[in-house]
Image (cartoon, rainbow, N blue to C red):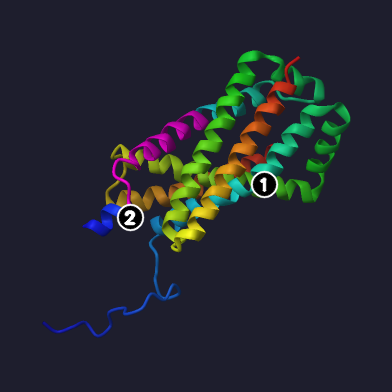
Amino acid sequence: MSRVRSAGSAHTGVTEWLLQRVTSLYMGGFVIYAILHLSLSPVRDHAAWKAWFAMGYVRIAWALFLASIMIHAWVGMRSIYLDYLHPLWLRFSVTLLTALGLLALALWAAQILITAAP
Amino acid sequence: MEKNKNRPVYLNLFKIRLPVGGILSILHRATGAFLVLLLPITLYILQRSLQDPAAYAQIAAQVATHVGRVVVLMFVWVFAQHFFSGVRHLLLDIGLGDSKPAARRNAWLAFAASLTVVALTGVCL
């Protein structure tokens, strides 16, 4: 029991479980919206593509989508590491690298969306 | 009590026959990890597509080639596969289709749905 206690931190896990599901619901909704929108008014050129991103709510929706991806990726990769990477130093380093990588990608995504503003 | 002589005493991955739900579950992880690895290139394509008309035209031209079509369809399959096994996870969470026969059936359904999406994309592309 003491081994179990020291290995796992009580109470963590529920948050991750919930985050994974909440982000998946948002991403699912966004993907369906994006597919419907792009089917109903197909983007034929750069101007039309830019025009879609020129709308504020579209950029907000994209920002939430990309943020959801990063959170979802974080929780998913973390649970893969917990299952397969057993040496603590390895799991710690890979988890840290993943966190930094996803944070960098999130900042880059934010920059792309801010640049897309008219 | 007599021991079963045929019981597996080691984990030989090639001797374990996973049910379809198990294969789908592994594939959910594999496709998820693969999509994460593709994130930088996906963001780069998004950035380039928004940059200027020339960059947009270049991407459109690359997608229109045979190689481009195959790459896009493979990406769509990986995404759709992860999407549908994910939807199945969410439904199992709320207790829908979680009996053994139903879970096997909807696991096959997840494969069928992703392949249908790939076929539809192939027709539309």
Residue A99: quadrant of the picture: top right
Query: Which labelled disc corresponds to residue B55?
Result: none
Identify the residue at the far left of this view.
Answer: B1
User: Residue drawn at (71%, 16%), measured in percent from left and top?
Assistant: A54
The quadrant the N terminus of chain B occupies is bottom left
* C-alpha gap between disc 1 and disc 2: 43 Å
Query: Which labelled disc corresponds to residue B73?
Result: 1
Instruction: Say whether residue B109 is left or right of residue A67.
Output: left
- Secondary element at image label 1: helix
Q: Nearer the viewer, mark 1 or mark 2?
A: 2
- Secondary element at image label 2: helix
| Segment tinted magenta in the rendering | A7-28
From the top left corner, tell me how far across and down residue A116 is, in percent: 74, 22
In the image, is residue A20 part of the stretch drawn in magenta?
yes
Residue underneath mark 2: A7
CB atoms at circles 1 and 2 under 8 Å apart? no
From the top left corner, tell me how far across and down residue B46 is, in percent: 72, 33
- Amino acid carrying label 1: it is Leu
User: Residue drawn at (35%, 42%), measured in percent from left and top?
Assistant: A13
Q: Could you classify mark 1 by the number of other residues whose Cα lies within 10 Å: few (under 14), some (14-19), or many (20 or more)?
A: some
Q: Chain of mark 2?
A: A
Residue B122 visible in image: no
Vertical relation: B32 (above or below) B3: above
From the top left corner, tell me how far across and down residue A33 is, in percent: 56, 24
Q: Nearer the viewer, residue B85 or B123?
A: B85
Q: Nearer the viewer, residue B109 or B14?
A: B14
